[in-house]
Image: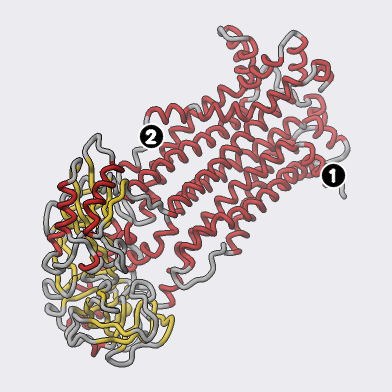
Amino acid sequence: MSALGRVVRSGVGRRRVQTVVIVLATMMAVTASVMGAALLEASSAPFDKAFRRQHGAHLSVQYAAARATTAQLAASADAAGVTAAAGPFPTASATPRLDGQDLRPLTLVGRTGHGGPVDTVTLTAGRWAARPGEIVLSADDGLSAPQGTRVRFTDLPGAPTLTVVGTARSVSRSADAWVVPAQLSRPDGYQMLYRFRAAGTAAQVAADRAAVTAGMPKGAVAGARSWLATKKEADRESSLFVPFLATFGVLGLAMAVLVVGNVVAGAVGAGTRRIGVLKSLGFTPGQVVRAYVGQALIPAAAGTALGVVGGNLLAVPVLEETATAYGSTSSAVAPWIDAVVASGMLGLVAVTAWAGALRAGRLRAVDALAVGRAARPGRGLRAARLAARLPLPRPVGLGLARPFARPARAAATAAAVTFGAVAVTFAVGLASSLTEVQAARDHDTSDVTVQAVQEGPGRIRGGVASRPDEVADPAAVTKAIDDRAGTRRYFGVGTADVAVTGTSGSFEVSAFTGDASWGGYRMISGRWFEGAGEAVVPTPFLTATGTRIGDSVALRDHGRTVRVRIVGEVFSTEQQGRTLLTDAATLKAADPGLRPVEYHIDVRPGTDAQAYARALNTALKATGASAVAGGSDDRSSVIVILNALTSILTLMLVAVAGLGVLNSVVLDTRERVRDLGIHKALGMTPRQTIAMVIASVLGVGVLGGAVGVPVGLALHDLVVPAMGHSAGLELPASALDVYGVPELVLLGCGGPLIAVAGALLPAGWAARTRTATALRTE
């Protein structure tokens, strides 16, 4: 081994604390960076590749059959900016019936083949429909049924029974199922698919839409869907993590740069005499610089390797959420991400260490041997004199004045504590926000819940309401609730699946009987509905349908059209936000058999909910319904993963911050070991020694906490809404305003606690050092 190699190896082995600090700092930064890059790639690349491969439609427009002719629709393909178009395709909304039960409605589109200049549909199984009586189901939004299944559509002309001959995937989500055009002899409307020269932004798509619909008769456009909305829905699950991980990635990278720079600068300061010896032995300035860079790169390489492994392992649970979205089977991190992050981290460490080691290269051998590792004479004297006048114990005063002797090192330590305080403040706020999101997601503040569905195949949530003979008689259930002492208020909710004109896929309607405004639904904007014909919807519904508050939408249910006006935006993640909340009277004409499948009850103050539920069950026994105390406890797996990742990454950042303080205090204590011996010889006790060392970081900790808490608050206010926007959601105010005065006071104590925790070990070492040993140490 060369002389330079021996110097590097001995330096790494001798500075064990600094080695551990660099390993943890780089591991933290690489872990968060690998996860963030992997999820960013997973949330965009599959859709973009599929969209290019399938010539996806930038805009899908649904036209009313009674308002425009096919010739007029075909002529829209010549509008300015259109590069390709397909259609017009006949469309119809129809409810399939399987095994005697109505399923969710499907948007059927008539196409002679799955190819074409726009929206090339990819067959995933079977073949394309070749004749009337055959149907191809969508692999994304359609009915899940194997090939050969016979499905009846009673609301199509002739009530035909269609045989499933294949499944296919459209990246544009242009239909729930496809048939030959002849199957739709009396279509509800026609679909046109367009690709444009410029459609990268919402404004461009809006301008393109205006261009293709400009010459259409009034009322001809029934609905439209932008490819940007489709992409947002496809990316929603994984993109939720990107702002969160980007934040921890940036904090980790900043912490790594700070810690590596501090460690190298401290090593140069503590090893000044050693540098002089090396230069006296013939080492060139370049060799000295390379020696200190190497001492940083070796532990950084170990931390990078651990971070790559940790990032891959922690990313798997989240990547599995998107692995099957486009038929992919891989949930592993792409190798190029590991390579780029690892090489970038090592390059960053090398540059940071090189900047810190330049001072070692510039030192003259004579100066290095003469100065040793003592601080510059006179530095910090004013602070020491001022501290001596304060009514404080002498050891505390000496400790408080110490940071002024090494201001650069104190600033680096304060920065490390600041990052730790930022991480803790942000993590506490994020956890509180996620708790509020979970409560808003459950939107169930009821004391007692009644399940009105009897035993059988019916479904309560996420699908079609059960058949009337499977649902308890509403009159009997409401009578039992009204007669029960302790009842304060209640409402019922039934569910039905409907189609929205102009979009593919079904939407779930929650139809309420009674006032449900108290039931835990958090409003984003607008107001709660007040009667039939009004509805509130979540943000994804507005995105998917291209509507806003004040607009009306047409719902297709059991072959009938119901128009509903949107009066408010509510927070809801049910059915990925493809829901609509309205009064039960809205769907009465289209679905007279719709019954509440759940009842939510608020009992009077002082009433025992458990006893109330037991008594109510006795009264409900004959109806087949059952009551349970308490509301929903359906915890989101995404929120659980986010909370777990927050805890892990925050603990790592706090650990790195504490080790950064430890490194600074170790360097400072070793530099002052002779002064420490003098203090001990003059009568300083071990407890006073510990107090002096801890006091030396207390002011730094207070400063770090005072800066870190406001920065953490600002970071929370920036990142949490961005996480909601990434998932296509607007968050309620309760999920954003989560910090109270008691929490802020406790968070403000976080900086001093991190600093004190980092100083405890070297303080104990200083207290145990014998006086004679300290006096003999240079």
Q: Position of residue 756 (x, y in %)?
A: 60, 26
Rendered image quadrant of residue 363: top right
- Residue type, numbered disc 2: Tyr
Q: Position of residue 268 (x, y in %)?
A: 73, 34
**Residue 7 horizontal side relative to residue 475, left or right:** right
Q: Position of residue 21 (x, y in %)?
A: 67, 39
Q: For the point 39% across and 50% down, which residue is it?
A: 722
Count neighbours of disc 1 (C-alpha within 10 A) and say few if under 14, some if 14 to 19, many if 20 or more: few
Q: For the point 34% across and 56% down, which residue is it?
A: 728
Say if 339 sits above or below 131 in the image: above
Given residues 426 and 210, the one toward you in this image is: 426
Given residues 482 and 39, the one toward you in this image is: 482
Rendered image quadrant of residue 505: bottom left
Name which of mark 1 and mark 2 comes first in the sequence: 1
Q: Which mark is residue 6?
A: 1
Say if 622 sits above or below 146 in the image: above
Colour scheme of the picture? secondary structure
Residue 497 seen from this side = no
- Residue type, numbered disc 1: Arg
> Which residue matches tag 2?
739
Q: Secondary structure at mark 1?
A: helix
Q: For the point 46% across and 30% down, which residue is it?
A: 747
Q: Position of residue 559 (x, y in %)?
A: 17, 75
Given residues 429 and 300, the one toward you in this image is: 429
> Marks 1 and 2: which is nearer the front?
2
Residue 609 seen from this side = yes
Q: Which mark is residue 418?
A: none
